[in-house]
Structure formats: C-alpha cells, structure tokens
Image: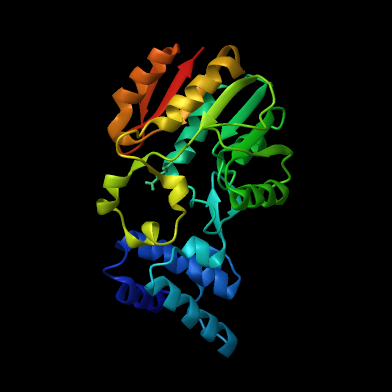
Amino acid sequence: MRNTLNYFYEKLAGIYARNEIKSICFMVMQNICNCSRTDLLVADSINLTDEQKSRFDALMERLLNREPIQYIIGSCHFFDIELNVNNNVLIPRPETEELVDWILNDNANEVGSLFDICTGSGCIAISIKKTKPNFRVSALDLSEGAIETAQENARKNNCDIEFITDDILSPKHLAEAKHDIIVSNPPYVKEEEKADMEANVLEYEPAMALFVPDENPLLFYDAIGRYSLTHLNKGGKLYFEINEALGNETVALLEKIGFQNVTLKKDIFGKDRMVRAQL
Ligand code: GLN
C-alpha cells in the first residue's frame, strides 16, 4: 500500500491536502479491489488485473479533473451509514454529522415527529430515523433529482420516510401536519464567498444547494423559521446548520420571529455552525 499511497501523493499534490489524499487513496483502492481498508493495510503488494488497471486510470483522470471521489464512486459514509451521492446532492459534510449528533443527544428520550427541510441526499433524515426508528420522519427538497437520491438512500438503509418535493420559500404541497423537531441545512454560502472555494466544489456540487444572494443570505432561515412557528408543536425545537460568519445574525433573526432559548453551537473547529431554537 505504501507505493500506491506515494503514487497518489505525487499525482494529487497541489489539488488536495496530504490527509485528504490518503483517504481518497483508500476509497479508490477499496472500490477497485472490492475489499476493506484492513485488507489493503495488511497486503504486501497490490496487483491489479488489466481490467482493474484500466478502471484505475479512468478514475485517476477524473480525480485529476478535480471531480470529488464520492461522486466518482457514487457513495460516501455519513454517521455510520452508506449513502449514494451524485451531482444532484451535496456530499454530506462532517459538520452536518455534528448537527445530527446534537439532535440525537438532545432528544435521546423523546419520541415524536421530525421534519427535515432541504434534505439533499437525505443524510440528516436517514441517520436520525436509523438511530431512532420510533420517530416519524418526513423530508422535503425542491430538487427532484435530490428527492430521488434521498428515496434511494432511505430504501438502501431500510428507513420508512415520507418525501415531499416542494419549495420551502413558497410551499404548495405541504400538509398542515405539526412536528416536534424541524431541522434544516439550507443553502447558506454567499455568492461573494465563491472566490475562496475550490474547483471540486464549484464545478461539481449543485449550486442550488449552496448559494444564496449576498444581499439576503438568511432567506431560507427566515422562511423556515416562519414556517416552523406554525408547524412545531408547543415546546418543539428547530435546528439549523449555519454559515459560520452569520451566527449572531441568525440568532437575532430567530428571536425576532418569536423563538426562545436560541442557542448557538460551535463545530469541532471552533466555528459557529449550528443553532437551536425553541417554541
Ligand atoms: N458547508 C457547506 C460547504 O462549505 C455548505 C452547506 C450549505 O450551504 N448548506 O460547502
């Protein structure tokens, strides 16, 4: 594996950091050889068949074009589950795992219903349903491609979740149902932040899942906050993943809408990343 790893370091230097290259290398080799990480670690040498070599070369070419490895192999891991991903959905981020972890710890003894708005791959809804099968879970997205992927992921993980295709900014198909928890990781990256982003995100991930106008970056928080005001049960909780630069503004907005106990939480990098609000 050492030689293979060195080959990856050499090829992908300048595109990814060393630790990222290492995890990409393992994902590629596990996929090509159809084996576990441990199999690779204990192997003295890795001999590829001609067919595997040509798949390897094709895959390396796509990596050199900065296509994310998760899209190339079509799957990723999130919170102990495997999810299919394609360019209709964002690749789930570790900070979203922290949000799921917060919700699960916070509601360890609760039973009720949860609604995930802007579900994308379904990562939040599915990881919560998987851990708390007694929860009634529903999830919404505007993108039909995202809803299809999320449905596939729910089936793959044996989760019974209701999916709705609708626009939370002007909903047309939403029932009057009330929930105990509403959660959302909506688009929150300002257009002006594009300048600091990498090609692997900008050229491959769905812009509609990422970007919001510079002059109104909290539009989803405003719409989801107002929706939640009338669709959360008394004492219900609203959870958001947020733009690290807009923590105080998001808190102020939710307080203005009428929420109480609005709490900001940092991610493991010390950045303002999550908010919880109570009705
Ligand atoms: N955290 C994601 C990123 O940095 C953005 C997710 C979102 O817009 N909801 O690309």
Q: Is residue 132 found left or right of 168 in the rendered image?
A: right
Residue 109: image location, x then y, percent: 62, 19
Number of marks in the rendered image: 0
Q: Residue furthest bottom?
A: 50
Q: Residue at x 47, y 66 (%)?
A: 26
- Residue 24 seen in the current view: yes
Q: The N terminus appears in which quarter of the rendering?
A: bottom left
Residue 61: image location, x then y, percent: 43, 78
Residue 182: image location, x then y, percent: 56, 25
**Image: 220 above or below 49:** above
- Residue 270 seen in the current view: no
Residue 114: image location, x then y, percent: 63, 27
Ligand 1 sits in which quadrant? top left
Residue sitting nearer the eye, 45 or 60: 60
Q: Residue at x 30, y 54 (%)?
A: 197
Residue sitting nearer the eye, 267 or 72: 72
**Image: 145 above or below 14:** above
Q: Residue at x 39, y 62 (%)?
A: 203
Residue sitting nearer the eye, 195 or 57: 195
**Image: 5 above or below 190:** below
Colour scheme shown: rainbow
**Image: 134 above or below 232:** below
Name the quadrant containing residue 232.
top right
Q: Is residue 117 found left or right of 148 in the rendered image?
A: left
